[in-house]
Structures are given as structure tokens and as C-alpha cells.
Amino acid sequence: MNNQALQIGFRTFLNLSSFTARPGQLNIESLVSLRAGIMCSKRPISNLSTISSSINEEKKSKKLKGLKLAIPDSEDNVVKENYQKIQSFKDDLSKIEAMTVQELRTTLRNVGISAKGRKPDLVSALKNFVSKHLDGGSSQEVEQISSNCTKNISLQNKAGNVLDETINTVSEVSSCKQIKRRGKHFPAEDETVKADSGIITTKKKITIKTAEVSVTMPQAEPWTILAHKKPQKGWIPYNPRAMRPPPPEDAKFMKLMSWNVNGLRALLKLEGFSAVELAQRENFDVLCFQETKLQEKDVESIKQCLIDGYENSFWTCSRAKLGYSGAAIISRVKPLSVSYGLGIPDHDSEGRIVTAEFDSFYLINAYVPNSGDGLKRLSYRVTQWDSSLSNYMKELEKSKPVILTGDLNCAHQEIDIYNPAGNRRSAGFTDEERQSFGTNFLSRGFVDTFRKQHPNVVGYTYWGYRHGGRKTNKGWRLDYFLVSESIADKAHDSYIVPDVGGSDHCPIGLILKV
């Protein structure tokens, strides 16, 4: 074996114990040099691990000493510093936007929030935390930050152990392969790792900070993370806990809800969150269902499952195709009248419309036809159905205001869909459907209540099953409450209930002053 090459390799190995970078960083250039020294021999090196063990204690001591620099001397000081820093954002949220990505991630981790994503995601998450928790600096907030700081200190201690283990693997005969694997597993966010003639090159150093990712808990409320392919400045995710106002105290109101259940019988069999629990939590006056998939023979048995106090129910089922489409209105307030369909036989055979007349408005529950695979029904949708529904609404509006709710099968704007560029020719986001939505509804005096209340909020109501969109909040806003312009100011709250499962859609609600 070439003794000079072996000596170079050993010296490089020894240099690993004297980092000049921040605690927790591994110098990739040194590792490359080590690989070069070892690769000069065709025979395995049997005494490499022996030499490494003799210096292990010295390395460990120096690494722990460096790591201690990153751990605060006093947990109380950490609590105070972090609390003061977070508190300073309350009066000037622009400070958050001026922070670097690293500062944002550090601050978010200190308060126990996931620090994944690009800068707009991090800015949005921190703004939401500040808006939600800092209303004057309660002792509970201090305790929360204190608890999170304690967890972070513990995490840093764990990072030290991972660091020692990483260094020890260099002493293995197969160290070159393991280094290559670790280079792929622990890259910094903007780092590039390449294999060029068997030698690893990189623009940055591999840091042990990514060890924190391995212990990050799954996001419990994914809808509070800004998930969008091309978010615009000022967009923030919908958070019902922070954005829903309390019910009005000085006025009478009705609470209306809508939900595409994607099969009512299947929903009733689920052991999870049920319509009964939804009624208990939301205390709605009227609930509209779409896509019940019931046949007329099923309706009577389903009525027996209704919640006490909601004796008024009105159902329509598809006659053209059994077990398809279907809509219903369930109410504890008896309507003045009820009608089904649009009065046009070509539209009414699929059971898509139920209209209930109340004292101060008409409520139309609609399940708008999907343009389908290959956009087979696109022409029917935009040239016949939308215009017929719009004309029907304008005719009713001659006597009293109109509310249209349901699955309208259109994400109207780019803010209403996670991946607008990739869905230009997907049913529900074609240019034709979006233009028809604007022309037949918005331009004719009907107001999108959610968008009026939340002009820059990203909130979805549908997540496809195929790619697990709910877990990552990659969804669409397809469900709406559109109201006549004359009562738009009476909409106290237009909201989404994203935590309710059982369907690929979630419920939406409208609190209307009457």
C-alpha cells in the first residue's frame, strides 16, 4: 500500500475532530479528501477503526463543548428572549417579512410550530401564531413558549448524540458509501450533492440541523399551512379558530350549512365524526346535502336517522341514473314552500336542485354537474346548465333575495386551487367554467360571501382521495354560498369547517342576520 496516501488519509480523519464551523456541522471537503486517500489502496484498512476509537473521547469532548454554545445557560433567559422577540411582532408584522429564512425557522421551532416550506409559508405561519396568541401577553403564552424552549434544548442534546454517531461512522471500512448516503439524507435546503467520478462535491456543508426534522410531529391542522404552487404576496391560509367571529349578539340570525357528503349511506356508517356531532357543535338551522347517491326507496329509512329537532327534510334523487347525484335540505325551521329542479326536464332528471322558501329569502341547494373525464359535459355545463340556473335565480329574486349554496364544481380564481397551472384543462378549473361562473353568477349581482369576507385567504373545501390531498392541504374551493347583493352585508360569517372528514369535501357555513 502507498504509505504516503495512507498518512494523508489518517491526517484528514484526525482533522474531523477540530471543526471551525458552527457546532453540528460536518466538513464535506475533509470527507472527500479522506475518500481520496483510502481509495488509493486496493486492500481493506483493518486498523482504521482502532485509530478512530483512540481519538473518540477527544472528539466527543470538543464536539459537546461546541454544542454547549448553542444551548442557553438558563431556560428562563430563553423564555424571556423568545417571548420578547415574538411580542415585538405584534405591533409591526412587517418585521416578520424582513426576517431571513433561517431566522423564521428558528423562531417557529422555538414556539413549537412546523418550520417546513418556503419563506411565504414560514411568514404566514408566524403571522398566524402572533395574531392568534398575542393579545396582551398572557401567562399562558409565556408557559407555552417556555415549554417549547425546553423541548428545543432537549432536541439540541439529541442532535449532539446524532453528531457523535455521524462522526463514528467515518471509522468504518465502508465509510465512503455511508458518507455518500448521508450526503443525500442530510443536505441543507439549498444544497446540491453530486457524484462526479466517485467523489462527492457540494456547495455547502452538511449540517446536523436536519436531525430536527426526524422528530417533527405531523401537522395536526394542515389547512393552517399555506399550500399553493404560486402564492401571491399577502395570501394567508384559512384558520377557522382565528378567523371566525363570535355569533352576533344584537341581531337575529340563521345558520345555514352545506356539505357534499359523497354518499350519505356510507357517511352514516362511519364511526368517526357524524352529522349528529356536527349539529351539536355547529347548532345549525338548515343543513344542505349534495351527492347523497340515494334512490327514492332509500329516503324513508334515512329519514328515521334524522336528528331530533330537524323534522323538516326534503329530498330529490336521480331518476336518470340510480345511486347517482341527489340533494336534500334538512331544517328545523319549516319553510314556506319547497320545489325541486329548475322546471326544465332536460336538467331535472338527475336530482340536483332543491329550493326552500323562507320568510326573508329563497335557499337553493345545488349540485352542479361536473364537466367529467375528458371534459365530456363541458359544453352542456357552460352553455346550458349555468345559464338556466342563473335565470332561475334571477326569476326568484324578483320576489325576495336568493341564496345559492352547494358544490358548484368550479374553483373560480387561482387562489381557490392549489395547483392552478397544472389544472388548466381539468374539470372545475377550465377557462370556460371560470368565465361562465363569473358571467352567470357574479356579474349578475350574486356575491361570493367567503371571498368577500376573506379576499386574500387560501381556503379549500375539496381534497382528492387519490393523492391524499387533505394531509398536505392540496385542495380546491368548490363549495360556495352566493347571495343576492341586497343581503350581502347581512352575511355575518362565511366559513369553512375543514376538520370534518367522511367525504372528499368538508362542510361550509353561512351565518346570516335576518
Image: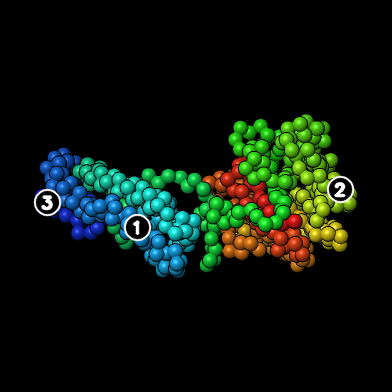
> Amino acid under label 3?
Gln
The answer to whether any part of residue 133 appears in the image is yes
Numbered circle sitting on residue 7: 3
Query: Pointers 3 and 2 in contact (CB under 8 A)?
Result: no
Of badges 1 and 3, the one in the foreground is 1
The residue sitting at 69% across, 42% down in the picture is 262
- Residue 21 point in image, percent of width and height: 23, 59
> For the residues marked 1 and 3, what is the alpha-carbon distance in whole angstroms?
48 Å
Q: Is residue 331 left or right of residue 120?
A: right
Q: Is residue 385 left or right of residue 29?
A: right
Quarter occupied by residue 435: bottom right
- Residue 491 point in image, percent of width and height: 69, 59
- Residue 21 or residue 1, whichever sits in front: 21
- Residue 476 or residue 181, whichever sits in front: 476
Which comes before the other along the chain, label 1 or label 3?
Answer: 3
> Amino acid under label 1?
Asn
- Residue 56 point in image, percent of width and height: 15, 44
Quarter occupied by residue 445: bottom right
- The C terminus is located in which quarter? bottom right
Of badges 3 and 2, the one in the foreground is 2
> Amino acid under label 2?
Ser
* Location of mark 1 (residue): 82
Numbered circle sitting on residue 337: 2
- Residue 303 or residue 475, whichever sits in front: 303
> For the residues marked 1 and 2, what is the alpha-carbon distance in whole angstroms?
60 Å
